[in-house]
Image: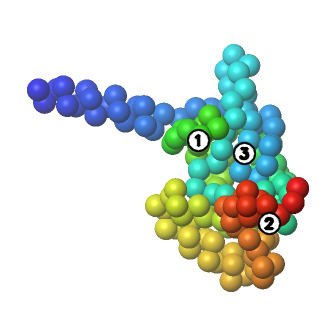
């Protein structure tokens, strides 16, 4: 029985913490990239724990450019954490010994997506970026992407 639980533990650990290596071939926006897997298979990854401004929103293009500067054309590793309602893989992306979501938040190009994250360190990085008025925090009226999407759905913002 003890061996059964040990085997089960290792099986779950492998599934949960399996890292995949891929090359970033496209940046859709600040928090969504397309990677090329083995066998020339493309996969869309939505970054975990961060929400960047939408493309029509202030700093949306800056967030996309920042993400591109960090990972476009590079080999990255990622760990899938979930799948969103659009079928995208939610993933933690690592490159050059850095965690991409943390780098985006630290530079002020994304919000800590606290609703889906328990990593309080990301909140601290956001507070530091805010205090230094980095990136989107230079705008005193910065609107979170989730609020922006809500306003758009309600018709309070036009395309």
**Which residue position holds label 2?**
156
Residue 57: % across, % down: 83, 62
In the depicted structure, whether residue 159 falls above or below residue 139: above
* Label 3: element kind: strand
Counting residues from the start of the chain, the first of labels 3 and 2 encountered is 3
Sequence-wise first label, 1 or 2: 1
Q: Quadrant of residue 158?
A: bottom right
Residue positioned 74% across, 36% down in the render? 34
Q: Position of residue 8 (x, y in %)?
A: 27, 29
Front position in the image: 142 or 117:
142
Residue 63 in view here: no
Asked whether 61 or 65 is in front, the reply is 61
Describe the colour scheme in one phrase.
rainbow
Q: Is residue 73 left or right of residue 16?
A: right
Residue to which mark 1 is pinned: 84
The residue located at (34%, 28%) in the rendering is: 11
Residue placed at 58% from the left, 56% from the top?
49
Circle 3 sits on which residue? 32
Of the two numbered discs 3 and 2 in the rendering, the one whose residue sits closer to the viewer: 2
């Amino acid at each position: 029985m003890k061996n059964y639980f040990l085997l089960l533990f290792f099986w779950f650990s492998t599934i949960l913490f399996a890292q995949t290596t891929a090359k970033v071939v496209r940046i859709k926006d600040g928090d969504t990239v397309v990677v090329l897997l083995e066998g020339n298979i493309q996969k869309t990854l939505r970054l975990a724990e961060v929400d960047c401004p939408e493309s029509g929103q202030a700093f949306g293009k800056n967030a996309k450019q920042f993400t591109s500067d960090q990972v476009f054309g590079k080999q990255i590793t990622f760990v899938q954490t979930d799948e969103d309602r659009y079928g995208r893989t939610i993933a933690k992306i690592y490159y050059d010994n850095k965690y991409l979501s943390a780098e985006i938040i630290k530079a002020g190009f994304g919000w800590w997506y606290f609703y889906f994250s328990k990593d309080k360190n990301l909140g601290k990085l956001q507070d530091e970026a805010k205090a230094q008025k980095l990136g989107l925090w230079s705008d005193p009226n910065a609107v979170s992407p989730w609020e922006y999407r809500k306003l758009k759905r309600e018709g309070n913002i036009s395309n």
